[in-house]
Amino acid sequence: METQFEVVIGLEIHIQLQTKSKAFSSDSIEYGALPNTQVSPISLGHPGTLPMHNRAAIDNAIKMGLALNCDIREVNRYSRKNYFYADLPKGYQITQFDTPLCDNGAVQIKLGDGTIKEIRLTRIHMEEDTGKSMHDQDLYDTLVDYNRAGTALIEVVTEPDVKSGEEAYAFVTEIRRLVRYLDICDGNMEEGSLRCDANISIMPKGSKVFGTKVEVKNMNSISNVKRAIDFEIARQTEVLTGGGIIQGETRGFNGLNGSTFSLRKKEAINDYRYFPEPDLPPTIVTKEYIAQVKSGMPELPATLFNRFTNEYGLSDYDASVLVDDKHSALYFEKVVGISPKYKQACNWISGPIRGYLNENALSMDEFTLTPGQIAEIIELIESNKISHTAATQQLFPALTKQTDASPMSLVESLGLANITDTSFIDEIVQKVLSEFPEKVAEYKAGKVGLMGLFVGEVMKRSQGKADPKTANSLVKQALENI
Ligand code: ADP
Ligand code: MG
């Protein structure tokens, strides 16, 4: 839709860090525990309690900063953001105000037409999560579960570089992929371990002054982030086109009808009262410390992509399909570590394996065949012991039902081996040629393309088991002798 407006979007992503305990206490953060069972006096901020730093949380935050090419701050101070809300038992949230752990940095996103765009980051800071208010569990009251209160979070804030729902979709997808590679968060938006707020405004094309922004929250999937933004752009366009003005406000998203709705109007300026957290010493992140964290980081998708294309000779397409999912990339690495048939291993993962997983609603980390078994199948095909068709259509499905069997033993017990016995194949060849005398004559007259027909017929009659190379040479020989 062509409009006279330009879209401006900045995203704020909250990422729950996968630590054993909370950001400033030893309370467990295990998901799904009974409400209010993981809450110590520290999480409640009772008098006399002292928060303590969680090293794993800091390490995870640094990893994210490094992955996004941020500048990592050396002296990190903490602040209390004071506000009253039922899910905030202490009455304040410990966060970083003027000394975020990371500045700058950027995320590369790939758009639908293949172009790469860079979304600049403003900051990444560490903070703690709030508890959870539940409005739908009781008929009359809102219930509060404080288990989540104090869980370590990082918040990634972008510059207003995002221009559409599609770009936001690509951005959140990339963030989710990175946290999964880094193993710092499960990236699950449905359960809220990854949350995205979108700040959206529009302004007349060519304007230098941003319009009033609306913040949309509560989108529990990446596609809902896109839907909410698309809706909001259309809504704001309609308001402005009709001569109205945009209210600065926070809106929620209704996934059932794809619309946003007002939650609360924003007063002129946020009146959070930040003040320095007196109970926590600053976290000092030295160059040496950063180097140590860096040495424990896994290879990231961009590095894997380069290796898969440059060293293994995979196409850009193949490599990007593999690195899209961490578990597929790691599985691929293991298969080619055993049998370096790169293209074949890739085809198995994006073909039969993915098909099987989709049919059974499984993800790659739930796949039960070992890389060794897949490597063995590839070798059986390469060495002509079994045809590709028999491998994909019979051996592989059988193996998924008998995961502890070796591929070779199944080839034997199911009788899938290629037949290389020349006298057996030759018998079929003679039969085929005698049944197609006109075709043989045409072949003799120069129509050499008929070769495929003869070989195909032989393969069919051997139920796909004749070794194709042997069949080919026997047909050729027989034709010469006629
Ligand atoms: P606030 O003080 O309301 O939290 P910030 O300046 O901290 O706002 O920005 C929060 C997010 O909103 C950032 O991602 C920023 O890029 C984005 N943002 C700021 N102004 C606008 C605007 N006019 N339109 C869209 N996004 C904006
Ligand atoms: Mg802000």
Image (cartoon, grey):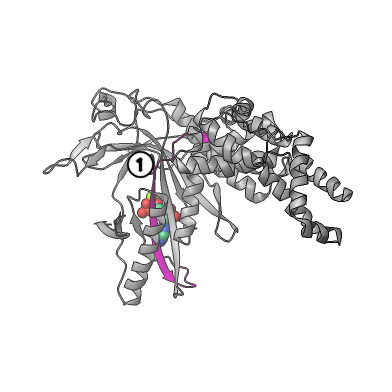
Q: Is residue 131 magenta?
A: no
Q: Quadrant of the N terminus?
A: bottom left
> x, y (%) of residue 70?
55, 43
Is 195 a magenta residue? Answer: yes
Q: Residue at x 19, y 44 (%)?
A: 136
Left or right? Give the position of 169 relative to 139: right
Which one is nearer the viewer's eye here, 255 or 352? Answer: 352
User: Percent position (x, y) of residue 185?
Assistant: 44, 36
At label 1, the amino acid type is Gly
The residue tagged 1 is 192
Q: Which residues are magenta?
A: 182-208
Mark 1 falls on what kind of element? loop
Q: Quadrant of residue 323?
A: top right
Percent x, y for residue 298?
58, 32
Which residue sits at x=47%, y=73%? 205
Q: Identify which residue is drawn at 35% across, 76% down.
A: 241
User: Residue 79 at what x, y percent from top left?
Assistant: 36, 37
* Lateral position of residue 396 relative to residue 39, left or right: right
Q: Quadrant of residue 50?
A: top left
The local crowd at label 1, few if under 14, some if 14 to 19, many if 20 or more residues have their Cα within 10 Å, is: some
